Image: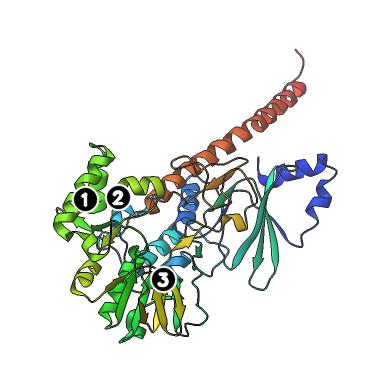
Amino acid sequence: MDCSREIEGKQAHDPFFDKIMNKSSRRVFVPGPVIVGAGPSGLAVAACLKERGFPSMVIERSSCIASLWQLKTYDRLRLHLPKQFCELPLMGFPSEFPTYPTKQQFIHYLETYARKFEIRPRFNETVSHAEYDKVIGFWRVKTVGKKFEETEYMCRWLVAATGENAEAVVPEIEGMGEFGGDIRHTSLYKSGEEFTSKKVLVVGCGNSGMEVCLDLCNHSAKPSLVVRDTVHVLPREMLGKSTFGLSMWLLKWLPMRLVDRFLLIVSRLMLGDTARLGLDRPEMGPLELKNWSGKTPVLDVGTLAKIKSGDVKVCPGIKKLKRHTVEFLDGKMENFDAIILATGYKSNVPSWLKEGDMFSEKDGFPKRPFPNGWKGECGLYAVGFTKRGILGASMDAKRIAEDIERCRDEEAAPYDHHHRSVLLLKSSSSSPSP
């Protein structure tokens, strides 16, 4: 039973339906799911649905697919994991791509993926409000276009695919208005070329912060790195294999704590004692910490050598800023020309999705932990919130497509049975009596 026919049926039997439906200026009935977000997660769901012959509509606030990758990442970025762990469902990377594809290669892969599965998002539309209408049994998804035009989409299924990295996290630091120099989030950082010979303070010691420091060094800047918390730094490769791949293989045979112990022993042999460099390790092992909190260990691509050589200086947390000056928590003060905030991203789901059961208002993630956070009530789904990268998103995309198809078949069964019964009755009434 298609969407338009079902809505017509509800309209005929609901005296309030017309009043509800005539509030908006433009309305679109979507026969399949609406997917909010055209990043890798949204594309994966659309492709899995397409393979099952299921139409969908992808809504994207930006002007392109994978806008985080295309518009908000630095030039030297590569996939941190080997390509086989970053493939979307139903299509692998080209064999000629390196083990760790570049940003440009990954974008090319995603664009090819969208073309192959004929995914054509509605670009430059920002979802302002999405809510389930219990009266008619459909989701109402309201969007605002580039010219402030409003559209309301009506759909049976809604997939939140805006992911973990929807909005930049910009911390409030005392004196930011007084600093006078360039302060920017890594989403606005492209290359260290514009910082040549400048003293730059990078705040945040995750993979992005570490790699920005390396990039600054390679462009003859003078970076310092603020380390506010404990951090696991692991070599990107161990024993001739990727650290991630080796970890996944070991977890098939050994408990997580034992694998963590192995990773830390090998890291100590390869990298030395990181605590001597100002990079204290957490008490919990890297895999256990990732599983518990979602915090990803840093895979070193050369920054640690720069810290050891003194090209990158490690600093404690910031107390406050003054005119081109940073005062640290240990009381020391130092002059800087610019500050780069490698402080990560956050989910924006609570700002547009109005429901209280599936997503947490606090952090915008599904309340139920992986692997059970992909499905909510009333046809609501989530993809890209597993804290397990593209691999986790791909797993959820397959589950979502399978569940939507099952749901459609179950809902269509009574209608098909009734339709067949009517046809049989008509056939028997028109048959001549013996």
Q: Secondary structure at mark 1?
A: helix
Q: Quarter of the image for the N terminus: give it.
A: top right
Residue 188, percent across and down?
A: 45, 75
Residue lying at the far bottom of the rendered structure: 197
Whichever of labels 2 and 1 marks the residue nearer the N terminus, that label is 1
Q: Residue at x 56, y 50 (%)?
A: 159
Residue 247, percent across and down?
A: 25, 47
**Alpha carbon separation for disc pair 1 and 3:** 29 Å
Q: Residue 264 got which mark?
A: 1
Check if mark 3's residue and mark 2's residue have beta carbons within 8 Å.
Answer: no
Q: Amino acid at mark 3?
A: Ile
The quadrant where residue 27 appears: bottom right
Check if mark 1's residue and mark 3's residue have beta carbons within 8 Å.
Answer: no
**Residue 256 can be seen, yes or no:** yes
Q: Secondary structure at mark 3?
A: strand
Q: Residue at x 65, y 28 (%)?
A: 417
